[in-house]
C-alpha cells in the first residue's frame, strides 16, 4: 500500500501518547470501539502489529515505537504549516498575485503602490502587467484589474478608478491638411492610429451622443499596443488617436494636440479590481482592496 489515511495515523499517535484507547477516544471525541477498529485496519494495511493490548493497558511494539518517533515531528510540522496558513486570515502577510493591464499600471496602481508597501511590509505584491484578458483563476492570480465592461458576472468587482472619458486628438499640423471631423462617420476619411488591446484585437472607437451609440473601425498608418507610442505618433502628425482624457491632458494644455468630436465622447465606467469570492478572503487581498478602492 503506497498511501495511508492521515486520520488513522493521527489516531495512532494519540493512542501512542495516551497509552489508552479510552483516553485517546476522549481526546478525539470518538468511541473507544472506533479507536480499536481504526487501529486494527491500520495494522492490517501496514502488515505489522503496532500495539500490544490487554484489557488493562496498551503498549507500543518496537514497530509502533519506531512509527511514533517518526510521526510526531511530521505531525508537528503539519500543524505548524496549517497554523501559519490559517494566520493569513487575520494578519496581512504573504503573496498577492495581481494581473493588471498596462493602461492601468500608471493610473491605478503606481500612485498607491508605495503607500501599500509601507503599510504592509509583510505582503509581497506580485504584479503582472499584461493586456490579455485572462482567466485569473486558471492563471494563478488572486485578483485582477480591468475595465468594468470586461469583467465576468461571477466575479466580485470593486471600483478603483473614477469614470474615464475618451478623447479624439490630432496635432495642429495634421489639421492644417485635414478637415476636422464633425461626426464619427467622418473618421473613415482620416488617417487614424489603431490601438491593439491585448488579445482582443484592434479597438473599435466607441462614441455616444444622447441616445445614439456607435463604434467605428478606423484605419491608418500605425497599429500599436503601447499608449506612449500612440501619443508620440499623434504629436508627430501621424494621424488621429483615441485615448483617455487624463493621458491627453498635458498635451492638450501645451498645444501639442487638439481635441475633436468632444460632444461624442462621453464618460464610461473605469477600472475595477475583481476577484473570485468573498468567502474566506485572505487578509493580504483585503488590505490591497482597501488601499486601491475609491
Image: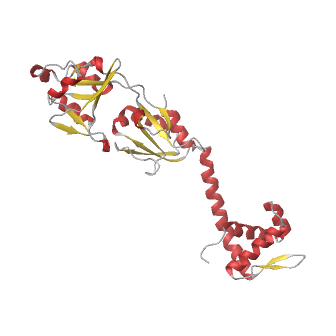
Q: Which percent across, then down, holds residue 5?
A: 66, 69
Q: Which residue is drawn at 71% across and 79% down?
A: 44
Furthest residue to the left? 177
Q: Along the line of sight, which residue is nearer the eye, 274 or 212?
A: 212
Picture quadrant where residue 14 is located:
bottom right
Vertical position of residue 30 compared to residue 49: above or below: above
Vertical position of residue 170 compared to residue 76: above or below: above
Q: Which residue is drawn at 22% across and 29% down?
A: 241
Vertical position of residue 177 compared to residue 95: above or below: above
Q: Which percent across, then down, holds residue 54?
A: 87, 79
Q: What colour scheme was applied to this rendering of the protein? A: secondary structure
Q: Give the number of marks.
A: 0
Left or right: where 288 falls relative to 243: right
Q: Along the line of sight, which residue is nearer the eye, 56 or 119?
A: 56
Q: Residue at x 58, y 43 (%)?
A: 281
Vertical position of residue 281 compared to residue 18: above or below: above
Q: Which residue is drawn at 59% across and 47% down?
A: 88
Viewport quadrant of the N terminus: bottom right
Q: Which percent across, then down, holds residue 41?
A: 73, 75
Furthest residue to the right? 56
Q: Which percent across, then down, holds residue 248?
A: 27, 25
Picture quadrant where residue 25 is located:
bottom right
Amino acid at each position: 500500500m503506497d498511501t495511508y489515511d492521515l486520520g488513522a495515523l493521527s489516531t495512532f499517535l494519540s493512542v501512542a501518547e495516551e497509552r489508552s484507547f479510552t483516553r485517546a477516544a476522549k481526546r478525539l471525541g470518538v468511541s473507544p470501539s472506533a479507536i480499536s477498529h481504526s487501529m486494527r485496519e491500520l495494522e492490517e494495511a501496514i502488515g505489522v502489529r503496532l500495539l500490544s493490548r490487554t484489557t488493562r493497558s496498551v503498549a507500543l511494539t518496537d514497530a509502533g515505537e519506531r512509527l511514533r518517533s517518526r510521526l510526531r515531528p511530521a505531525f508537528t510540522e503539519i500543524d505548524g504549516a496549517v497554523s501559519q496558513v490559517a494566520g493569513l486570515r487575520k494578519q496581512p502577510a504573504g503573496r498577492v498575485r495581481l494581473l493588471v493591464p498596462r493602461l492601468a499600471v500608471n493610473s491605478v496602481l503606481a500612485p498607491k503602490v508605495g503607500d501599500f508597501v509601507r503599510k504592509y511590509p509583510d505582503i509581497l505584491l506580485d504584479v503582472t502587467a499584461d493586456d490579455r484578458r485572462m482567466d485569473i483563476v486558471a492563471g494563478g492570480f488572486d485578483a485582477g484589474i480591468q475595465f468594468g465592461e470586461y469583467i465576468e458576472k461571477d466575479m466580485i468587482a470593486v471600483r478603483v478608478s473614477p469614470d474615464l472619458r475618451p478623447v479624439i486628438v490630432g496635432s495642429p499640423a495634421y489639421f492644417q491638411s485635414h478637415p476636422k471631423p464633425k461626426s464619427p462617420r467622418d473618421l473613415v476619411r482620416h488617417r487614424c492610429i489603431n490601438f491593439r488591446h491585448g488579445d482582443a484585437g484592434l479597438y473599435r472607437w466607441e462614441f455616444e451622443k444622447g441616445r445614439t451609440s456607435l463604434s467605428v473601425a478606423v484605419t491608418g498608418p500605425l497599429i500599436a499596443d503601447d499608449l506612449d507610442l500612440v501619443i508620440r505618433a499623434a504629436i508627430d502628425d501621424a494621424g488621429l488617436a483615441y485615448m483617455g482624457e487624463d493621458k491627453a491632458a498635458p498635451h492638450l494644455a501645451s498645444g501639442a494636440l487638439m481635441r475633436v468630436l468632444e460632444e461624442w465622447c462621453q464618460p464610461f465606467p473605469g477600472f475595477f479590481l475583481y476577484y473570485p469570492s468573498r468567502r474566506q478572503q485572505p487578509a493580504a487581498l483585503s488590505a490591497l482592496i482597501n488601499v486601491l478602492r475609491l
